[in-house]
Amino acid sequence: MLKFNPTTPMQFYYAEGEYVSGQGMNRTWELIESEPYNIFYGEWKGSYGDRSLAAESLGVKDSATVRTFYNPVIYAKLRGEQVVVIKNADSTAIIDGVPDRNNPNVYELWGGVDNMKEENLFLEFRVRRYEGL
């Protein structure tokens, strides 16, 4: 059994887009909810040492590894959509429906998501600070 300390509240938003004729792409950010919840808890481990140096060589200034409980809704979105993770469920991280790229609690998925041992018990993924478009 994996042991971790899920003390960090998080929210997840995914990009929903549609093409509007004559206007172009219209993108909105939708809160991921798994009834009745929209705040989820996980373990947040910041990068340091060799991992931090390797990330910085790729232009990533701030990254972390997140472990949380398996949730099929979150797992599906992380695998198939652009998702931002709001650390500490910061209510100031989304402004007018758009992630605030200047907010230090806004991160985006960096790499894939692992359904650990395919047991549908835990998820692990890496995130980096969101820089916007």
Image: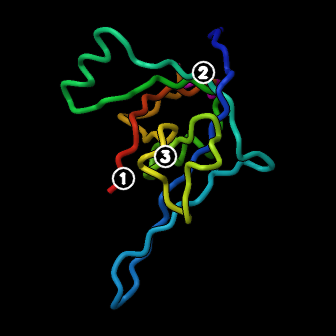
Which residue is denoted by mark 1 in the rendering?
132
Label drawn at residue 84: 3
Name, please, the residue furthest toward the bottom.
22
Any magenta on residue 120? yes
Image height of 131 relative to 124, above or below: below
The structure residue drawn at horizontal position 69% and vertical position 51%, both measured from the top left corner, is 33
Q: Is residue 8 left or right of residue 107?
A: right
Q: Residues within 10 Å of mark 2 (few under 14, many from 20)?
A: some
In the image, residue 25 above or below residue 15: below
Q: Magenta-highlighted stretch: main secondary structure? A: loop
What's the residue type where badge 3 is placed?
Answer: Val
Q: Of 37 and 106, which appears nearest the observer?
A: 106
Q: Which residues are magenta?
A: 117-121
Of the two numbered discs 1 and 3 in the rendering, the one whose residue sits closer to the viewer? 1
Separation of marks 1 and 3 at Cα, in angstroms: 10 Å
Expressed as whole percent of the image width and height from the top left, the position of residue 3 reads: 64, 9
Where in the figure is residue 62, as x and y percent of width and height? 37, 28
Question: What SS does tag 3 mark?
Answer: strand
